[in-house]
Amino acid sequence: QVQLVESGGGSVQAGGSLRLSCAVSGTIGSVYCMGWFRQAPGKEREGVAAIDRFSSTSYADSVLDRFTISRGSAWRTVDLLMTSLKPEDTGMFYCAAMQWGGGACRYDAAMDYWGKGTLVTISS
């Protein structure tokens, strides 16, 4: 089992930045891919960014060049640096993990484990 705990959410004005962090624990060796997802009010959850064990990354078009996903060397933390934030970025952000053998590590990949989320609110 893998446990994920997000932190770093908050309220900022449009154009600002936030760094989200995900603390990873449990059977970390089973994890191949980590991702961040968001769910805007009244909308379905969507993938934002993903990173694999080899530090290859994948991003949704809507966040390309604004968001950066990174991981700690021991795979115990995965961060999402968000810049040039827009009101439409508002939502609950979730950290997720995929085990080895789960397919390609894409921003919209199916994940095996999920955190409980952290709320991001962007005001105009």
Image (cartoon, grey):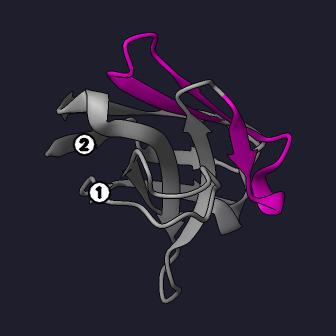
Q: Secondary structure at mark 1?
A: strand
| Amino acid of disc 2 | Leu
Earlier in the chain: of badge 2 and badge 1, it is 2
**Residue that badge 1 annotates:** 114
**Residue range corresponding to the magenta coloring:** 56-81
Disc ID at residue 4: 2
Residue 112 placement (x, y as % from top left) = 32, 60
Residue 45 placement (x, y as % from top left) = 49, 75
Disc ID at residue 66: none
Q: Is residue 27 left or right of residue 89?
A: left
Q: Residue at x 65, y 35 (%)?
A: 17
Answer whether residue 61 is magenta in the image: yes
Label 1 crowd (10 A; few <14 / some 14-19 / many >=20): many
- Quarter of the image that includes the C terminus: bottom right
Tell me if label 2 and label 1 are in contact, CB under 8 Å. Answer: yes
Q: Secondary structure at mark 2?
A: strand
Label 2 crowd (10 A; few <14 / some 14-19 / many >=20): many
Along the line of sight, which residue is nearer the eye, 17 or 109?
Answer: 109
Answer whether residue 77 is magenta in the image: yes
Q: Is residue 91 left or right of residue 74?
A: right
Q: Residue furthest bottom?
A: 42
Residue 72 placement (x, y as % from top left) = 45, 15
Q: Is residue 110 left or right of residue 116?
A: right
Q: Is residue 39 left or right of residue 50?
A: left
Q: CA distance from mark 2 to mark 1?
A: 6 Å
| Amino acid of disc 1 | Trp
Q: Residue at x 51, y 84 (%)?
A: 44
